[in-house]
Amino acid sequence: MNNTKKTWTDLQRLLLYLAFTFVSTFLWFHLANPDHATWEDMGQRRQSFVALGMMFPVLCHVLTRWITGEGFSYGGADSSYFGLTLKDGKWKYVLLACLLPWAYSELGNLLELALAPAKFDPEYYLSQGIERRLLFLFPLIAIVSGLVGSFAAFGEEGGWRGYMMPKLLKLMGRGKALVVGGVIWGLWHAPLTCIGHNFGTEYPGFPYLGILMMCLMCILMGVLLTFVTEKSGSVWPAVFLHAINNSGPSILQGFVNPDRSAAPPFLGPGAHLLGLLVIVIPVLIIWYRHSPAPGSPKQA
């Protein structure tokens, strides 16, 4: 009788993880929304039910480690990245993760107003039931709410940054891994993009243009999320960044009225993509300069 234990390669583990994650999540999205109602029409209760699918990446991370016998260490090589330490300057990446979403959100809104000045409405925030004094506290509110309510973001980042990206980085190096990982993450969002969660449904090329835009956004977001994960040795800065991003930490958002301009479709998301790119470029430069990718020459 052969009792030889199966030895899993990193590629096999990655493919198993992705199969588990895509199949389970897509099945959940179908079961939770069987009539394929749009995000806007399904109601808050069903939205919350559908959103539980965001937990599958981290659950499949744990399942893959259990099946392949990879272990569950919190830190070090081939770890889950679930641990967190603020020693040795790693607290800086927690702080950076909290501030980056504010920076690129404000920049994206600024670019949107520059490209479509008619969208500027000095009292738009009032139509949203927001007091002026609260508007200027939005970044702080978003940071606090993101830190407190980061449960859903952990569902994604505990899988994508905690398992997928370390495997991709080992298999293909940083540059290719960031692009491939972003595309995978963007395609995973496809069922939600197809029901209008990200960009609505009323745009030319629906839903394919939306899926493409989501992939581009996930590539750029993935750079920041992977950077803070690698530098801190933990998924938690990425969790905080992701959660704060979802909380909308922007003051200028209160002055951008989408109904005051017949701007081309995707001008808003495109402007935010450019704002994100402006932040990503210096992060990449710093990253490569101080932490050369595997196989590249060491910097002096």
Image: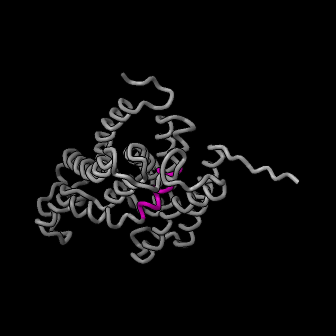
* Residue occupying image coordinates x 55% and y 35%: 172
Give the answer, above or below, for where 279 lies relative to 74. Answer: above
* Residue occupying image coordinates x 36% and y 29%: 289
Tell me residue 152's x, y (percent). 42, 64
Position of residue 78 in the picture relative to residue 178 (left or right): right
Determine which quarter of the picture holds residue 126: bottom left
Q: Can residue 271 be seen in this view?
A: yes
Position of residue 2 in the picture relative to residue 27 (left or right): right
- How many numbered marks appear? 0
Assess whether residue 158 is covered by the magenta stretch. yes
Give the residue at the far front of this rendering.
87
Tell me residue 123's x, y (percent). 12, 63
- Of residue 55 and residue 213, the one placed in the foreground of this image is 55
- Of residue 60 and residue 66, the one placed in the foreground of this image is 66
Quarter that holds the N terminus: bottom right
* Residue occupying image coordinates x 26% and y 64%: 144
Quarter that holds the C terminus: top left
Assess whether residue 192 is covered by the magenta stretch. no
Tell me residue 80's x, y (percent). 51, 53
Position of residue 262 in the picture relative to residue 161 (left or right): left
Give the residue at the far right of this rendering.
1
The scheme the figure's colours follow is one colour
Q: Is residue 201 visible?
A: no
- Of residue 160 and residue 216, the one placed in the foreground of this image is 160
* Residue occupying image coordinates x 29% and y 39%: 278
Give the answer, above or below, for where 147 lies relative to 222. Answer: below
Tell me residue 48's x, y (percent). 43, 73
Give the answer, above or below, for where 231 lies relative to 31. Answer: above
Principal secondary structure, stretch drawn in magenta:
helix
The magenta segment: 152-163
